[in-house]
Amino acid sequence: MATTLIKNAKVVNEGNISESDVLISGQFIERIDSDISHPTAEVIEAGGKFLIPGAIDDQVHFREPGLTHKAEIYTESKAAVAGGITSFMEMPNTVPNALTQELLEDKYKIGAKNSLANYSFYMGVSNDNIEEVLKTDKKTVCGIKVFMGSSTGNMLVDDESTIENLFSKAEMLVAAHCEDEATIKANLELFKEKYGEDIPFDQHPIIRSDEACYISSSRAVGLAKKHGTKFHVLHISTEKEIGLFENNIPLKDKLVTSEACIHHMWFSDEDYAEKGSFIKWNPAVKKVTDRSAVFNAVLNDNIDVIATDHAPHTLEEKQNKYLNAPSGGPLVQHAIPAMMEYYLDGKISIEKIVEKMCHNPAILFEVEKRGYIREGYYADLALIDSNSPWSVAKDNILYKCGWSPFEGQTFRSKITDTFISGHHAYKAGKFNESVKGMRLGFERN
């Protein structure tokens, strides 16, 4: 068993920052204390860098199997590790869609072979696979994913009886993409009549409107409350939706929870003129007021989790006109550096960043022994140098697609080291791929 001693770190954990050493023995954190010594440990001198629990990203699209021209579990997990994300939960809209237990396990086999980060994969829902969905093992699978609005792929669930059946019978967390398809289709037809093939990208948040989001999410939240379903609404993008979520009870006791994504906290409709298709996501990046409302909802705990919705497409695909340019973009390598910019600008504490990106996903999904810096927990850790400026450029982007919506952006913080279950997987820009990530376990009754 390898033993590693991290010295003189600013440990950010459970709402506090403390000057501490951390001793890692094998896969686990053995001791957290000041002035630890060990006769044989590899010593990592943190020199006052922040040491955080590795982030748990509860929403990514790594495109494997079937869409590996866009991304692979290997390439995107590598980018995640470089960005301090040590665990990911990946979506079912791959090819084939993960709609049977056998197809779901096929993805886990790929993860076991190729993922550098810890991994879990959602079970997908269609209009006719509910019996298969209900077989999902809640101790070894992160959750059930339902698209209540079409996005990349063809997994729209629009059968009322299927949705009622799912919400009434699911015994584990259900996560949803919420946009009302009828509203979007009606809006799109109007814009096709007006612009033909040349719809400007800045019309995307009007086509996929705040009303479309609210109609779907409010209906889904109502169903969850009716049936007592543990329900998680992904990528909140509108001010209007925030009132659907409570902030006056502990996360562990919440029935309905929500997530904000990096792009909805960073970009706004003012950025379409420069970024165009590169910030085309579903749900859409919307008004400045929506961005501010989402950010404030993260601060005041109406929104519980920060994730990425990492969803790469090729540069060639993204260079199409509006109707043919797919929605989504890559984010896992740059999510923590982006949030650190807000910390350095005094807009959010680093303790709150850790709460939303590390602790809360662990609480919400009941992840086994991860998400915290605690003795006896897996040593999933990231060291952050908050005074090490670097600029995002083609030659340092690790995504298979080779581009980022942050190209040209200078970040002041850099992830210097990442540990995955005690394995020093990333150090000063170099990877040690000798040990792969682990399948996440879940402590659910």
Image (cartoon, helix red, strand yellow):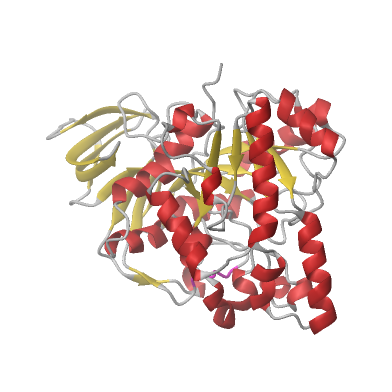
Residue 396: horizontal and vertical position, in percent? 47, 68
Q: Is residue 221 left or right of residue 41?
A: right
Image quadrant holding the C terminus, namely top right
Q: Is residue 279 above or below residue 73?
A: below
Q: Residue furthest left?
A: 35
Q: Depth check: 135 or 157 in front?
A: 157
Q: Residue at x 43, y 57 (%)?
A: 295
Q: Is residue 399 above or below residue 323?
A: above
Is the magenta region chiefly helix, strand or loop?
A: loop
Residue range corresponding to the magenta coloring: 402-406
404 inside magenta stretch: yes
Q: Residue furthest top?
A: 445
Q: Residue at x 73, y 35 (%)?
A: 104
Q: Depth check: 38 or 280 in front?
A: 280
Residue 4: horizontal and vertical position, in percent? 28, 36
Residue 146: horizontal and vertical position, in percent? 72, 41
Q: State which quadrant residue 142 falls in.
A: top right
Q: Is residue 224 left or right of residue 320?
A: left
Q: Depth check: 384 or 228 in front?
A: 228
Q: State which quadrant residue 444 falls in.
A: top right
Q: Give the total number of marks visible in the rendering.
A: 0
Residue 77: horizontal and vertical position, in percent? 55, 49
Q: State which quadrant residue 125 falls in.
A: top right
Q: Residue at x 82, y 34 (%)?
A: 162
Q: Is residue 196 visible?
A: no
336 inside magenta stretch: no
Q: Is residue 21 visible?
A: yes
Q: Residue at x 74, y 54 (%)?
A: 180
Q: Depth check: 39 or 314 in front?
A: 314
Q: Is residue 364 left or right of residue 391?
A: right
Image quadrant holding the N terminus, namely top left
